[in-house]
Amino acid sequence: METGVLTARKAVLIAVQRPDVDDAEFGESLAELRRLAKTLGLAIAGTCTQRRATFHAGTYLGSGKIEELTSLVAGATADTVLVDHEITPSQARNLEKATHAVVMDRTAVILEIFHRHARSRAARAQVEIVRLQYLAPRLRERAAGKDRQRGGIGGKGAGESTLELDRRKIRDRVAELTAELASLEQERWTQRARRRDLARVALVGYTNAGKSTLMRGLTGSEVYVADKLFATLDTTVRTLVPETHPRILVSDTVGFIKRLPHGLVASFKSTLAEALEASLLAHVVDASDPGFERQLEVTAEVLDEIGAGDVPRLLVFNKIDRVGDAAAPAALLARWPEAVVMSAKSASDVARLHAKLAAFFARDLVEAELRVPWDRQQLRGEIFAACEVIEERADTDGAVFRVRAHRDTIARLGGG
């Protein structure tokens, strides 16, 4: 099924619980699907679940459950069925035939949300590539009974079938978007190169953990904030405020989710390059979510998958103001003593995290002297941006700066 603009307002959720999934994990996954549906603006009209060792090869659910699902969809006047797994094209087509409703599996739902929330050229291109790759193997099911031959020039020859033509269009469009992304990646590489000597912290974590709200608090920037899954798809980079010397850059990255389509992980590797190049990852966790421990595992797995598993990490338990248990902060710190427990809506908590970040980067600073000849005074701007200037004096040959900065920065600027 093509994931286009959705007009449905009511949906029924379906899920199969296999023996290797316990009740708690199954319940968390269904709750997550409900939140995904809410993000799409869908009201949940009902839920149909089944315990099975494997998914039914033809219809995902067993025949008895299909009858129950059909009645549920009809009785609730729902026109969408959301499946909490990735299903095959034929399973989707058979479910649509049985229910007369639009069927979207978990991957299609996530892709639709990404499609709606993508704002920059890079994010839109990345999402479209994955959506087209998702659609390509489903063309045969969509084109069943409609596979006519289109004649060639002057009607000579068999020409291409509708299916072949659509597949070629997808290949051409993916190639076009890939070339566009390569060009945009060169621009981003140039931007990152200009920031190479600046301390960088990347906010990472599960979707809707509060990273964007925290970004606002730490940088004072007006980044987009919404109580939705995947509200942020574009990496935003801002300076930590109040400003430190040297400056610290903070980047807000796309959130993770359980069973995030692999195509999206691969596609957003360039967006997540901020996480790869950061000196510190602030792993933001929603402390009020009952399933936060599984979310910790998912984020760790995705970071390993993109090659950021070895980057130093600071655990930040956010939304503590939503936790009813007064003993929760102490319990969290007992298990994770180096973590920060806070609320991004509390100015004092944000200031405490600010101090922790500044202290992390200050520990690697060394003092040195930089001599800048009078004919190279254009370096002054770089020195003040990348170093803490302790003293500045002049001699006959130029300006002399006593600075605190990272060793690599001092070496690049000609110090020793």
Image (tube, grey):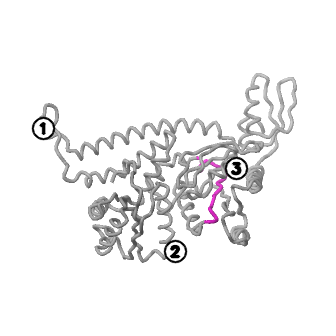
Mark sitting on residue 24: 2
Name which quarter of the figure residue 413 lies in: top right
Residue 295: image tag = none
Q: Can you say whether 48 is above or below 154 in the image?
A: below
- Tell me the crowding category of disc 2: few under 14, some 14 to 19, or many 20 or more residues within 10 angstroms, Cα based: few
The percent coordinates of residue 239 (x first, y second) are: 69, 42
Measured in 3D between alpha carbons, the distance from the residue under mark 2 to the one under mark 1, in whole angstroms, is: 59 Å
- Of helix, strand and loop, which one carries label 2? helix
Of the pair 140 and 357, the residue shown nearer to us: 140
Q: Residue at x 57, y 57 (%)?
A: 208
Quarter of the C terminus within the rendering: top right
Q: Earlier in the sequence, mark 1 or mark 3?
A: 1
Disc 1 marks a residue whose amino acid type is: Gly
- Point out the tag, 3 or 2, that comes first from the N-terminus: 2
Q: Secondary structure at mark 1?
A: loop
Is residue 169 positioned above or below 53 on the image?
above
Residue 217, numbered label:
3
SS label for mark 3: helix
The residue that label 1 is drawn on is 157
- Left or right position of 14 against 298: left
In terms of depth relative to the viewer, which is nearer, 343 or 374?
343
Q: Nearer the viewer, mark 1 or mark 3?
A: 3
Q: Is residue 281 magenta?
A: yes
Residue 14 drawn at (x, y percent) = 39, 67
Q: Is residue 173 shown left or right of residue 412?
A: left
Q: Is 275 situated above or below 155?
A: below
